[in-house]
Image (tube, coloured by chain):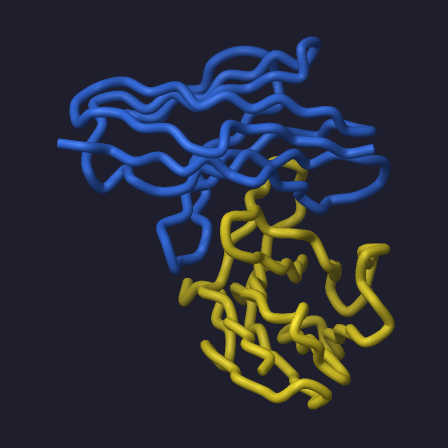
Chain colours: A yellow, B blue
């Protein structure tokens, strides 16, 4: 069990640019989640997948955000035309099936939009 | 709607006991989770409750009352390394596996 890994750890970009983050879940986990966290707040749900199917997407998520999990393994989160308000920590998590299965989080990608 | 409330900050002394409360109002309920998050790090899983009562795991215990929409995390024999944020999260809603998190309680342990 190597844990959930995310890449890059940090990303600084200029407003208006596109960014893409990658998440590699724990290999035997079929569920993958994306969350966003700002300072002093709890993680905010963005979207989640079961295998390659995107099952739910937050209504708070604008059309500039898109996520994929093409082969049911790793996932990417893309933000188009970044805005300063997108600056946050983007957390990926994975879990096994079952209502009692906890989410295991990666160390996150910290995005700074200048 | 979905609402999870926790105190924003708490302080305690090394060796003491502290109780962090969480109240929730969600459209469904499939379990409540507690996570610990040190500054700049990922949240790590502490406990899970789905039935009423107390779950004990070493120095940490978690309690759930579904009828009251209430949970608490009890930390005993506090250590300096317990200084962290503690996040309450509910797996709720219809036909969903997502966790909804509270804003977290920042605990500071003093010597």
Quadrant position of residue B95: top right
**Relative image position of residue A36 (x, y in whole percent):** 62, 60
Q: Is residue A83 above or below residue B46?
A: below
The quarter of the picture where the N terminus of chain B appears is top right
Q: Residue at the spot x=48%, y=63% of the render?
A: A106
**What number of labels is visible?**
0
List x then y, in percent, for residue B93: 81, 35
In x, y percent, where is residue A92?
Answer: 58, 63
Residue ID at (65%, 74%): A84
Q: Quadrant of residue B109?
A: top left
Q: In the displayed image of the protein, which residue is found farthest to the left?
A: B111
Left/right of residue A114 with respect to residue B8 in the rendered view: right
Quadrant of the rendering where the C terminus of chain B is positioned: top left
- Say whether residue A22 is left or right of residue B75: right
Drawn side of residue A75 relative to residue A66, left or right:
left
- Give whichever of B78, A22 is nearer the camera: B78
Residue at left offset 58%, top offset 82%: A114
Tell me what residue is drawn at x 21 percent, y 19 percent.
B16
Q: x and y percent of residue A46 in the render?
A: 72, 59
Name the image quarter holding residue B82: top left
Is A33 located above or below residue A86 in the figure? above
């Amino acid at each position: 069990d190597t844990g959930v890994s995310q890449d890059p750890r940090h990303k600084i970009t200029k407003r208006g640019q596109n960014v893409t983050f990658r998440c590699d879940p724990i290999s035997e986990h079929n569920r993958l989640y994306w969350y966003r966290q700002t300072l002093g707040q709890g993680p905010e749900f963005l979207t989640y997948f079961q295998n390659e199917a995107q099952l739910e997407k937050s209504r708070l998520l604008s059309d500039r955000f898109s996520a994929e999990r093409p082969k049911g393994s790793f996932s990417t989160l893309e933000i188009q035309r970044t805005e300063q308000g997108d600056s946050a920590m983007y957390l990926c998590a994975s879990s096994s099936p079952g209502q009692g299965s906890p989410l295991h989080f990666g160390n996150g990608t910290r995005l700074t939009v200048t | 709607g979905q609402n999870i409330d926790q105190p924003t900050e708490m302080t305690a002394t090394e060796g003491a006991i502290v109780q962090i409360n969480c109240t929730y109002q969600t459209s469904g309920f499939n379990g409540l989770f507690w996570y610990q998050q040190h500054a700049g790090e990922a949240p790590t899983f502490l406990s899970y409750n789905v039935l009423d009562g107390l779950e004990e795991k070493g120095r940490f215990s978690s309690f759930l009352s579904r009828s009251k929409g209430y949970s608490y995390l009890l930390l005993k024999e506090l250590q300096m390394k317990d200084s962290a944020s503690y996040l309450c999260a509910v797996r709720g809603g219809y036909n969903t596996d997502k966790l909804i998190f509270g804003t977290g309680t920042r605990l500071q342990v003093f010597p």
